[in-house]
Each structure stands twice: as structure tokens, then as C-alpha cells.
Image (spheres, rainbow, N blue to C red):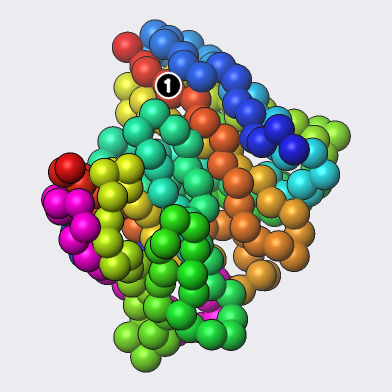
Amino acid sequence: DTGVSQDPRHKITKRGQNVTFRCDPISEHNRLYWYRQTLGQGPEFLTYFQNEAQLEKSRLLSDRFSAERPKGSFSTLEIQRTEQGDSAMYLCASSSQGAETQYFGPGTRLLVL
Amino acid sequence: AQSVSQHNHHVILSEAASLELGCNYSYGGTVNLFWYVQYPGQHLQLLLKYFSGDPLVKGIKGFEAEFIKSKFSFNLRKPSVQWSDTAEYFCAVNYGGTSYGKLTFGQGTILTVHP
């Protein structure tokens, strides 16, 4: 068990550019979650996968955001046409079905200039 | 709307003082309750959780929390804090029990412990 990993850890981009983040969950965890955290706030739910199926999406997830988990293992979160308001920490978590304890990765900090 | 409220944004204590951090949640149905901690420079870690059974749950590092269903509360306590407890603490709720995946977090409480 090597924990949840995320890549990159930091990303600086210019407004209007596309960015993609990757999350590798704990092996054999079939549930994977994305959250966003801004300064002074707790994490906010974005979306959730069970295996490769995306089961729930938050209203926070605009059309510019898309997430995939094609083989039920790692996941990617893409933000198209980034805006300054997208600057935040993007957190990934995983859990095994039935256990419901989510284990978090270190996050990807995005800064949009 | 489902929401979680943490009463204190920043708590400052001296070592050996007792700690209680408040957490209240909306909704009266089945919930799973969590406290997560984020130490400086580290990622979120589970401190303790409540799913069912004894409403007084014990976690790591001497922390405990009490689930009071009638008050929709899940307050975190520690009898004697240490400097190493300096961190940000988040209360989180999974609404709908195990049927739903997402956690709803409070805004966090920063705890600063002076030696």
C-alpha cells in the first residue's frame, strides 16, 4: 500500500490554457473521488467513480471540467480554458467499496495567472 | 441543503490544555461521520470515524469524538493537547450512509498549540 499519489504536485498555467491532472489510487480501491479546496475552506466534492463508471458529478463541475477513469485504475481530471477562479488545490481520494473511509493524496496545487 | 459547520475557525491553546472542536451537520438521516487532520505540509489523514454503535469513538493520538444524534453534532475532544497537534482539523459527513460516495466537509479549524 503506497497511498494515493497525484501528479503533478504543482501547476502554474496561463488563463485559457488546458491542464490535466492524474491520480493513482491505492491499489484495489474501486472508488475514486475528486475534490477541490480553496484557501480557508474545506474540500468540496467534484466527482466520484466506482471502477470506470462516473456515478456522481457536482454542480461545481462546469462543462470545462472532465474526469475519466478509463480502466478503473488511475483517473485524470482535465480543465479546459482555465480561469483564475480555477486556482485551487485539487485533491484525489480513494476507498474500497463497503469500507467508506477515503484516503487522500497530497493534492495538485493549480495557479492560473 | 446538506452542510457541515465547524464553530471555530482558529483555536489557540497552550500545551496540556483540553480541546473541544465543534461540528454540526444538517439533515437527520443516516450519516457516517469523520474527522480528518492536516498537519503542516502534509495531506489529509483520517483521525477517527463513526459509522454506527457506541457514539463515543476513539481515534489516533488520544483524540475522541462523540456523536449526539439529537443535536446533529460530532465534536472532537482531546484531554491534553501537545505542540505536535498543531494542524488543521476538518469534520466531514457522508450523507446517506454507504449508499453515497461523497464527503461534505466543514470549513476547517486551525489549531495552534503553544509549547
Q: Is residue B10 visible?
A: no
Left or right of B36 on screen, residue B20: left
Q: Which residue extends farthest right?
A: A71
Q: Residue A79, position in %: x, y?
A: 53, 25
Which residue occupies the foreground of this view, B53 or B3? Answer: B53
Residue B16 colored in magenta in the image: yes
What stretch of residues is rendered in magenta? Answer: B12-32
Judge the density around disc 1: few (<14), some (14-19), many (≥20) Cα neighbours within 10 Å.
Answer: many
Left or right of A79 on screen, residue B115: left
Left or right of B59 on screen, residue B74: left
Up-down relation of residue B95 to residue A53 (above or below): below
Which residue occupies the foreground of this view, A11 or B62? Answer: B62
Q: Identify the residue shown where x is 40% and y is 72%.
A: B65
Which residue occupies the foreground of this view, B16 or A55? Answer: B16
Up-down relation of residue B65 to residue B115 (above or below): below
Question: Circle 1 sits on which residue?
Answer: A110
Residue B70, quarter of the rendered image: bottom left
Q: Is residue A108 visible?
A: yes
Q: Residue A104, position in %: x, y?
A: 56, 42
Up-down relation of residue A6 to residue B75 (above or below): above
Under mark 1, the amino acid is Leu
